[in-house]
Image (cartoon, coloured by chain):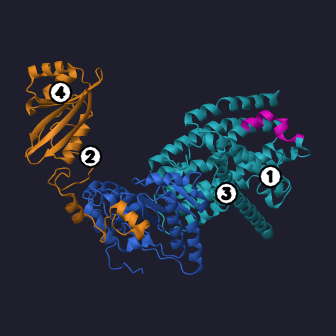
Amino acid sequence: MLQETVTIIAYAFISLLVITIYGLTLNGLVMKIVARVHGRFGPPLWQPFIDIIKNNAKRTMIYHGTMFFLGPVFRIAGGIGTYLFIPAIHGSEVFANFSFSGDLLLVMYFFFFGQLGMALGAGESGHPYSAIAVSRGLAQMTAFEVPFALSVISLAIQYQTLSITGIVSAQQGGILHWTVFTNPLATVAALIALLGMNMHSPFDIVLAPQEIPIGPPTEFHSAYLGLLQTNRAIFNLAKLVLFMNLYFGGATNILILIIKTFSIYMLSVIVGVSFPRFRTEQSIRFFLGIPTILGILAVIFQKL
Amino acid sequence: MLKNQENQPQKLANAGLPEHEKYLFCDARPRIRHPFKGFWEKFLNWARANSIWMLAYGTGCGAIELRPLMTARYDVFRYGIAPRPTPRQSSVIIIGGYCSVKTLKRIIRSYEQMQNPKFVLALGSCTINGGMYWDSYNTINRIDAYIPVDIYIAGCMPRPEAIIAGFKKLKQLIKSGKAEGANLYAENFDWYKANQKKIIKDWNMPDYNW
Amino acid sequence: MTKLIDRLKANFRIKNVTMQRADLIFLTVPEKQAVSLITYLRNQENFSHLVFLTAVDWIEENKFQLNYMLHNHGFNFSLGIRVMINRQKPVMTSIHHLWEHASTYQRELKEMFGIDFPGSPEIDQNFILEGWEDIPPLRRDFDTLKYSERTYFPRTGRKSHDPRKFMKSKIYPEQGEER
């Protein structure tokens, strides 16, 4: 009994560590790719690691209140929670994480959980830019959640299960069994929602990096910011792994996981470097337009 | 180099604030944060030197020379330097050129909001000795009387290449553990505050902007 | 435009009419008639644009000279109105009721020259100098060098060169200091 518990915890740590390192490297790689598109050299691949070390090495921290302190904690709890309930590699014991029969619902909940905690924390920091960005972010999130939720409902009808493992198993046995071929409408709707989730260029009004408001983390610094950066790597990858599982047949070993998640991420990176930014109301209108219609059609076709 | 501050009063007066606002602001003094010893501090200094986030705040004409740094031609991102819009997250503030009394007030606010290992890069001859505004009624003559400066970059204006050279020099200073401006500021806090209050006559902010 | 000057001369005591360019005339009016002249020009003669409002310190004559620059977009014609006011008690009637943005110019004049415009909005608030305690800095009896040396911390060892000579001596030292 004790041995089993220790094994499970150790597996969770290994899985989390691998995914954190991979996520940070992916961030560095994307920075490099964006720089090459701009015609620059760009920062080194390991820049996100140095940034996190630097932020955690700051000697002072300012305390604005309990929720301010808990904001990044909620955020990273949301990130780790999302990841740990998604089976990362199909059939692997280490990377199966805490998958269970209804995990898809829990994962959908965890998507929101971190954002809400962060919103409360950013609100207590008292910075006006944080409040602006939180309202923008929550509005945009509500919008892209609609096509994504419709797509997931369509999948649930298609596979008659809410277990991610079940969905992945149903897609095994050839490339044509993947959801992207069996249910293309739902896939397209979800991939458009993914663009919003990843907060790359057309939909990055929330963070608006390097401009006047940096978004909710305006007032977060030092180790708070280190936590947020770590979470960005984990949460990002949790989303990618989820999409890989739901629509692209999952992965049976870590190499396939890396190839597939990287390809899915490249979609939003390519869209990000080629398109200018939407305003909040434009992006909401966009998500509630064609992607939502596609999502509804996907549900209807599954029901027919 | 760093001495103890035990015989100093631990609370700041915040005399510039109106009475009904005093409870809103922190009145603690900045304290010296001693660095670790040995290898660990060297490792942290290496990280600090390779991830310099500069506060994107143009205080004078020199700010125009900072923009090209981020373009494809000069590309400071390859040295781990990135602009940040908020002083909380940035580790280096760049005093870009001439600095009027009105700007100095904002510089002090921004500088004090930055977190402890923090560095100051001063551009242009105006920050060194007043430059062409040396006899102006409104431009300060030397910035190091008000905040501790790590690197001065001479020129009017220094070209982006000179600024990159300044950054490289700053990296060497950080790696060798000599860039302890924040501790210097905490140590000589009263001297800096006296200098600042000498020229900022309407001091309507807390004595230390936490 | 001579017609306009003649019309004005019929009603106002106008002196020193100088024609700077074909489209720019300066004239002087007494302090008492200035605001009524400006109102007349704005309402009757279509000078709808206040271009600027500045001051000159004539310390020898103990006067401040206010310059109101008005522009008529119909004729593309500018008219500068000089008003001499007493330097000891510099008070002038505000014209913020004619142009709202005049109040900003008046705030600046209050701060830089100490000229008061009673009734102008926010006239007593800081414009650029925050918490200035000395005499207004653009008055000519204000010595900026002395103030700078007294207030700021001048770094010693400051040296000035003629850039042409200095660079010559640097680049071609064999040619000597002269030439």
Callout 3, which amino acid? Answer: Gly
Please, what secondary structure does the residue beneath circle 2 have? loop
Callout 1, which amino acid? Answer: Ile
Q: Is residue A183 magenta?
A: yes
Quadrant (top left, top right, bottom left, bottom right) of the C terminus of chain B: bottom left
> Which secondary structure dominates the residues rendered in magenta?
helix
The label on residue A110 is: none
- Asked whether the residues under the numbered discs 3 and 4 touch, taking CB atoms below 8 Å apart as contact, a structural biologist would say no
Label located before the other in sequence (4 or 2): 4
Q: Position of residue C84 (x, y in %)?
A: 11, 38
Q: Residues within 10 Å of mark 4 (few under 14, many from 20)?
A: many
The Cα–Cα distance between marks 3 and 2, rounded to whole angstroms, is 47 Å
Q: How crowded is mark 3: few (under 14 residues within 10 Å), some or many (20 or more)?
A: many
Specify whether A221 is left or right of B24. right
Callout 2, which amino acid? Answer: Phe
Please, what secondary structure does the residue beneath circle 4 have? helix
The Cα–Cα distance between marks 2 and 1, rounded to whole angstroms, is 60 Å
- Asked whether the residues under the numbered discs 4 and 2 touch, taking CB atoms below 8 Å apart as contact, a structural biologist would say no
Q: For residue A288, which quarter of the picture?
A: top right
The label on residue A28 is: 3
Residue found 78% across the figure and 47% down from its top:
A244
The label on residue C127 is: 2
